[in-house]
Amino acid sequence: MTSTSRRTFVIHALTASGALAASSLALSQTAAAPMVKDTDANAVALGYKADGSKTDTKKYPKYAASQNCANCALYQGAAGSEAGPCPLFAGKQVAAAGWCASWVKKTT
Ligand code: SF4
């Protein structure tokens, strides 16, 4: 192997491994979005419960058992998903069965 072809091989190998590492990182960031916890400060502020049936109905009388994140206009998870993003909790996922005081009926 000449020094030019060896250099070319090394450059190609480094580029390929860098691209693979970058795509793996992007995948893991998507898959690893953490769940909002009921105890997170903004969750407490919005009365979020991952299990909406545990909502404090004295504090949030507008809650109804039929309401959950999955049928909220702000929920961005796919239909039938167990969890998905919500713009009120950037970088995290809310439970489809969750609820918070900002619930708005999905119209579609
Ligand atoms: S705004 Fe809607 S989707 Fe987001 S946490 Fe509250 S109820 Fe769930």
Image: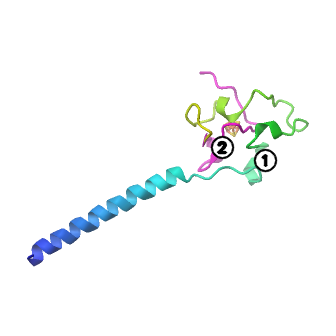
Q: Residue at 28% across / 62% down in the picture?
A: 16
Q: Let me know if residue 89 is in the magenta part.
A: yes
Residue 35's label in the rendered image is none
The quadrant in which the N terminus is found is: bottom left
Badge 2: few (under 14), some or many (20 or more) residues near its Cα, within 10 Å? many
Residue 20, image x and y in percent?
35, 59
Kindly identify which residue carries mark 2.
94
Kind of residue sitting beneath label 1: Ala
Where's ligand 1: which quadrant? Answer: top right
Helix, strand, or loop for circle 2?
strand
> Real-space Cα distance between discs 1 and 2?
15 Å
The structure residue drawn at horizontal position 68% and vertical position 35%, both measured from the top left corner, is 69
Q: Under 8 Å from ligand 1: the CB of mark 2?
A: yes
Q: Which mark is residue 45?
A: 1
In contact (CB < 8 Å): disc 1 and disc 2? no
Image quarter where the C terminus lies is top right
